[in-house]
Amino acid sequence: MLTDMSLPWWAWAAMGAGLIVFAVMIGMTIKRNRGMHRSLFASPYTLWMIIFTVVPVILISYYAFTDANGNFTLDNFKNFWDSHYEANKVIKAEAERLGVDYSQYITRGTVNVDTLVYSLWMAFQCTIICLVMGYPAALFMADRKMKLGSTLVVLFIIPMWMNFLLRTVAWMTLLEDSGLINQVLELLGLGKIQLMYTSNTVLLGMVYNFLPFMVFPIYTVLNKMDYRLSEAAADLGCNSFQTLYKVTMPLSIPGVVSGITMVFMPSVTTFFIPRVLGGGYTMMFGDLIESKFLTEGNWNAGSALSLLMMLLILVSLSILRKADPNGEGGGLA
Amino acid sequence: MNMKRILLLLLALAMALTMTACQSGEATEGSKPAERVVNVFNWEDYIDPAVIALFEEETGIKVNYMCFTTVEDMIVQVEANPGAFDVCFPSDYIIERMINKGMLAEINFDNVPYSDQILDFLLYPDYDPQNKYSIPYMWGTVGILYNTTMIDLDPDNTSWAILWDPRYQNSIFMMDSIRDSMGVTLKYLGFSANSTEIPELFAARDMLIRQKKLGVVKAYQVDETKDKMVAGEAAMAVMWSGDAMYAIDLNEDLSYFVPMEGSNVWCDSAVIPITAKNKENAEIFINFLCRPDIAAMNWNYIWYSTPNKGAIELIEDPDGDYAYDYTGNRTLSPTPDIMAKCEFFRDIPEDYLSVYEALWMDLKNTK
């Protein structure tokens, strides 16, 4: 079930038209300003965005609403709701051909919906854990009295110099039955424990990978905060807990919102981590999309899932935006 | 520069960009017409590099060697670049698909005299019933790799049922691959690994779900399995014989067998796309690969089962370079009894494949 990778002529035409529109836009800007204008400096990025963001989104939408022959269809979305949708058609046809009753085999497959719910649940847990662990870390790092703060910043950044795939695979050598942790446990005479291939292992991998994305936005906001505000709070009789609760925390909300966004979004779309640390036992939505494209070669169904994913992200972004209307935390939400 | 000129320039650039983009799908012919070449498209790391050098030296034909990592990718490349490849090495059911799509040229066996070296059971295979389009290159089976220090069994008399034995909690690596995992389950149930019977497929799914719920499966994976078996991470793994040879070479506690119900036998064969530009050179190249000493060289590099009678004689020759007990190695050469129960994967029609995929997803969705 492999979709032909060559694009229809009109897709090329659309891309060409996009570039021409881009050229005309630049031309108009020059004409309107009778010369160069500052906005022209953004044109390399605009071009980049057209080629690598706008065009792919158009292509995904095209694939999501068409079948393998390029005809318009909503089957890909029906397939999301019922993963047996295509199979049931075949089973019904087969039953008719053989004149037998196959009604017991006609069922609804819930894998896509279940996986989406599971991904949201995992992402929610990951975000909460990151927030609980990351907020105190950010407070500590931003505290001017602590000399260790800036060292901690560096310690957080250094692992990020390495690709996350490698860091995830490295966890495997720690957690395996013959891994480092189990070897130490054996030496101590405690016996081996099963650490790999559970959903908690996947969660660990996610928290490990995404924690810095929670810490840094909060740290940036706290670092910029006027520390005299806490001094004033102390002068007015707040103890340190009250200062944290009534002054620091409300002022750091934009950073928290940013952090939640930056952890939640990649968590929902996580793939690879469940496969490496979870042993393919459970799938997350990212794995599902990957398998549609790479294993089944069904680009149309995969695109429909991707489109739904994007929609979900847009909705959650607009909800989060309400919590940080001025975009103080970097305006990510 | 005036405005109009900038606009025109940008327009020209935009058009040039789209033009080149349109043409990038076509093959580029870089070689001089006088030079004799053969364009070979093979799996990654699937030939002894010395063989290519030797071929160029002996025949004066230059080899353009290109690699793919999945057969699906190979088909797409061959379709998208007509004339770019003269020899490809697809697997059995992909050959069937390519024959049905009319993508393959008939091989002129007069130009491949060494094709008489091919083992009899690989001739006239189900996927190429007239034996016109393909010449076997390497073959193997799907079976169970197990750690003899963890499991005691009789490899000649063991059923696939061992994968459903609740005693082996958390100790089996299953293949994260639809056709392979469904295939061995269908075989265990006594059905064909190419079944398109709905009740049989559902029975296989229910078996796989039962296996997952039993708690015997440690993980579903493909590429990682062989190294984890070497490290002693699990007692058993469903595996291709080629990967099993690699693992056994690194850990002598490991052993491989094909369960008594039979299994899937696979074969990667040399084929010539119908669009090939250098068909004769392709046949010379394929003939070279079938020469016993060359087939033995490739066997010694890849360590999969060789389809070449002459090569097996050379490998077993006690005074030869290899002096290896090939026939005595059950991983490389399963007994004829077992082979009689093995079958090739056939190309399952797309609509039935969607049933396979839906059922496999049910397994994935089982917690």
Image (cartoon, coloured by chain):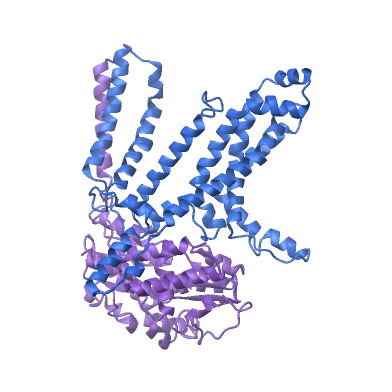
Chain assigned blue? A
Looking at the picture, how far across and down is residue B116, in whole percent? 29, 81
- Quarter occupied by residue B96: bottom left
Instruction: Compare residues A212 and B80 and report the one nearer the observer.
Output: A212
Residue A76 higher or lower than A134, as above or below: below
Q: How many marks?
A: 0
- Quarter occupied by residue B20: top left
Do we see residue B80 in this rendering? yes
Instruction: Compare residues A27 and A192 and report the one nearer the observer.
Output: A192
Residue B2 higher or lower than B149, as above or below: above
Q: Could you tell whether A15 is left or right of A326 in the image? A: left
Quadrant assignment for the N terminus of chain B:
top left
Looking at the picture, how far across and down is residue B10, in whole percent? 28, 26
Instruction: Compare residues A6 and B52 and report the one nearer the observer.
Output: A6
Q: Residue at x 38, y 33 (%)?
A: A48
Q: Residue at x 77, y 27 (%)?
A: A240
Q: Residue at x 67, y 34 (%)?
A: A138
Do we see residue B64 in this rendering? no
Looking at the picture, how far across and down is residue A137, in whole percent? 69, 37
Q: Could you tell whether A114 is left or right of A18 in the image? A: right
Residue B140 higher or lower than B5, as above or below: below
Q: Residue at x 77, y 21 (%)?
A: A234
Chain assigned purple? B
Q: Could you tell whether B258 is left or right of A15 in the image? A: right
Q: Residue furthest top?
A: A34
Looking at the picture, how far across and down is residue B178, in whole percent? 41, 66
Q: Could you tell whether A49 is left or right of A241 in the image? A: left
